[in-house]
Image (spheres, grey):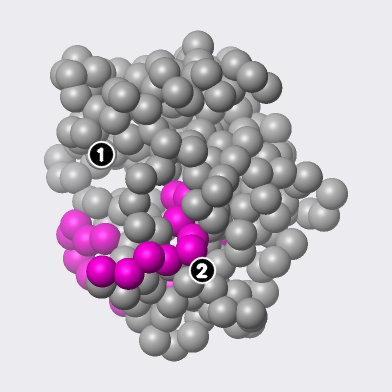
């Protein structure tokens, strides 16, 4: 396996989990159990298996419970916390706040992701395609056929070189963003203050032709609401 592009990942775990109610009434979404373990442990275990040594986890909603859980893990990446108790900063703001703790580049992933690797793990896939001279960020995409439980219209198109183009309103796009990316500090330059979406930074990178994507060769599960848990567990139980 080729060397990883980074030894550190940002795990985005601060959201309110509204779509996962009522399961999130008393616990943050990353601690909702799927297939025998909390959602965030699926991500952290995959990071550990890939050889990613550090994870910076942001926390806002029911942060005490999330912090206690990640700190008591006995294995996997070394965990650092990015504390958003005072203000939820959204995806872009969360990365901007954590940036002093993150090397250049760094992986970023949503804490509610569940996926099955293809021939190579996703972090090796991203690392093998990474070109810092051309890219501000590299997004892991999945085609509809390998996006289980997903009922949306897709997010992006990829040209033959891997450049990203957004789905047009009312149309279908062939690729769904998995919530996993490899990010350069250049993407984060001149970031807005306070809460903002990563989409703000992606749009600039699209306009500068510096946002790229690759297609994931394994499976990816949409686990956005309680109805997705049972089918995801059924798929995973089949191996």
> Circle 2 is placed at which residue position?
137
Residues rendered magenta in the picture: 170-197
Question: Magenta span has 181?
Answer: yes
Does 7 sit above or below residue 208? above
Does 20 sit above or below residue 203? above
Mark 2 residue element: strand
Question: Magenta span has 37?
Answer: no
* Residue 76 x/y as whole percent: 62, 27
* Residue 10 x/y as whole percent: 47, 47
* Residue 223 x/y as whole percent: 39, 33
Which residue in the rendered view is the most extreme toward the top?
36
Q: Is residue 201 visible?
A: no
Q: Residue at x 64, y 19 (%)?
A: 238
Mark 1 residue element: loop
Q: Nearer the viewer, residue 174 or 218?
A: 174
Q: Residue at x 29, y 30 (%)?
A: 225
């Amino acid at each position: 396996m080729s060397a990883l592009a980074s030894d550190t990942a940002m795990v985005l775990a601060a959201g309110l989990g509204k779509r996962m109610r009522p399961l999130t009434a008393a616990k943050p979404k990353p601690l909702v159990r799927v297939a025998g373990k909390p959602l965030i442990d699926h991500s952290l275990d995959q990071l550990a298996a890939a050889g990613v040594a550090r994870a910076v986890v942001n926390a806002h909603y029911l942060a005490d419970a999330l912090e206690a859980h990640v700190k008591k893990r006995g294995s996997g990446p070394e965990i650092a916390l990015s504390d958003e108790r005072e203000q939820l900063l959204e995806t872009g703001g969360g990365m901007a706040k954590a940036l002093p703790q993150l090397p250049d580049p760094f992986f970023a992933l949503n804490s509610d992701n569940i996926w099955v690797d293809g021939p190579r793990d996703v972090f090796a896939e991203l690392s093998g395609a990474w070109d810092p001279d051309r890219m501000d960020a590299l997004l892991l995409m999945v085609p509809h056929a390998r996006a289980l439980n997903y009922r949306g219209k897709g997010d992006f198109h990829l040209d033959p070189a891997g450049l990203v183009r957004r789905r047009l309103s009312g149309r279908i796009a062939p690729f769904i963003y998995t919530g996993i990316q490899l990010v350069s500090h250049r993407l984060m330059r001149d970031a807005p203050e306070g809460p903002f979406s990563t989409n703000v930074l992606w749009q600039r990178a699209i306009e500068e032709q510096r946002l790229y994507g690759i297609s994931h060769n394994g499976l990816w599960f949409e686990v956005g609401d309680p109805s997705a848990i049972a089918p995801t567990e059924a798929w995973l139980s089949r191996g």
